Image: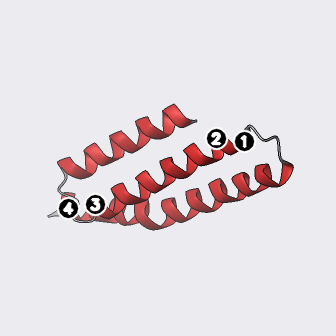
Amino acid sequence: MEDYTKYHFDMEEEMQDANKYPEIMQHKIEHHEFIDKLTLLKRDSKKDNLLLSLKTIDYLKDWTINHILGSDKDFGDYLRNFEGT
């Protein structure tokens, strides 16, 4: 998951850069914060704690939904308008 996340974020940021997406810095910050959180969750997962596992699942679910329906949707809207002009 960690490798794919980094790959996905790199590709998305390259696309944003190539299309001069004005919100690219905020998007990169969100990606960076997510990777930092993944690193902490990975470290803490070694504690074999059920509550931590549930918190991890909730965090990943919430972040993914909010990021896709928020930032990624905004980028998609930008691309549709950018390509249409």
Of the pair 52 and 30, the residue shown nearer to us:
52
Between the residue at mark 3 and the residue at mark 2, the CA separation in whole angstroms equals: 26 Å
**Badge 4 vs badge 1, beta-carbon distance below 8 Å:** no
**In the image, residue 23 lies at what x, y percent?**
27, 65
Between the residue at mark 3 and the residue at mark 1, the CA separation in whole angstroms equals: 30 Å
Q: In this view, does 84 lie above or below 19?
A: below
Between the residue at mark 3 and the residue at mark 4, the CA separation in whole angstroms equals: 18 Å
Q: Between disc 2 and disc 4, whose residue precedes?
A: 2
Q: Between disc 3 and disc 4, whose residue precedes?
A: 3
**Badge 2 vs badge 1, beta-carbon distance below 8 Å:** yes
Q: Residue 64 carries which label?
A: none
Between the residue at mark 4 and the residue at mark 1, the CA separation in whole angstroms equals: 42 Å
Between the residue at mark 2 and the residue at mark 4, the CA separation in whole angstroms equals: 38 Å
Residue at the image position 64 percent from the left and 40 percent from the top: 42
Q: Name the residue under label 1.
A: 45
Between the residue at mark 2 and the residue at mark 1, the CA separation in whole angstroms equals: 5 Å
Q: Mark 4 points at which residue?
A: 82
Q: Is mark 2 on a helix, strand or loop?
A: helix
Q: What element carries label 1?
A: helix
Q: In which quarter of the image is residue 74?
A: bottom left
Count residues near mark 3 (Cα–Cα under 10 Å), then give few for <14, some for 14-19, many for 20+: few
Q: Which image quarter holds the N terminus?
A: top right
**In the image, residue 59 lies at what x, y percent?**
65, 58
Residue at the image position 74 percent from the left and 57 percent from the top: 55
Residue at the image position 83 percent from the left and 55 percent from the top: 51
Q: Name the residue under label 2.
A: 42
The nearer-to-camera label among 3 and 1 is 1
Q: Name the residue under label 3.
A: 25
The amino acid type found where label 3 is placed reads Met
The amino acid type found where label 1 is placed reads Ser
